[in-house]
Image: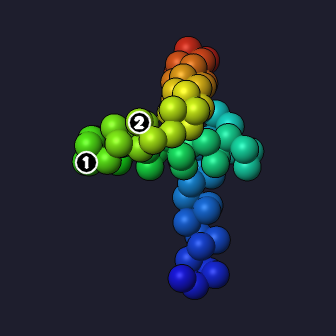
Amino acid sequence: MEKKFAEQFEALMEKYSELLVGDCSKEVTEKVKIWALYTHIAKSMPTLSKHWNGLYPDAKNEMKEIIAEIKKLNEQKRLQK
């Protein structure tokens, strides 16, 4: 993957994070990436996500926390409008 593309994609993710939750810090943007990818996997390959959840219950709990945080931040952002 070219460095230029990686930088451009990172800019896309930062903007998505800003629009979704009102924060484009590195930490929040990384959580948004994880949330988006996990959500896509859970919808497109639910058996895989269930398998992963079973293998890594601690990670499943952390994923639940990330999902809850993204949902909360998104709701707060929508209420600010």
Q: Position of residue 34 (x, y in %)?
A: 53, 46
Q: Secondary structure at mark 2?
A: helix
CA distance separating discs 2 and 1: 18 Å
Tell me the quadrant of the picture where the N terminus can be found: bottom right
Residue on which disc 1 sits: 44
Q: Position of residue 65 (x, y in %)?
A: 58, 26
Relative side of 45 to 39, left or right:
left
Say which residue appears at 34% left-offset and 38% top-offset. Answer: 50
Amino acid found under the numbered disc labelled 1: Ser
Q: Amino acid at mark 2?
A: Gly
Q: Nearer the viewer, mark 2 or mark 1?
A: 2
In front here: 78 or 52? 52
Tell me if residue 3 can be seen.
yes
- Residue closer to the observer: 41 or 48: 48
Q: Residue at x 62, y 61 (%)?
A: 11
Q: Is residue 47 above or below residue 21?
A: below
**Is residue 48 shown above or below 5?**
above
Q: Is residue 69 above or below residue 35?
A: above
Mark 1, secondary structure of its residue: helix
- Mark 2 lies on residue: 54
Quarter containing the C terminus: top right
Q: Position of residue 70 (x, y in %)?
A: 56, 29
45 and 67: which is toward the camera: 45
Query: Does residue 66 appear in the picture of this structure?
Result: no
The residue that appears at 73% across and 49% down in the rendered structure is: 26
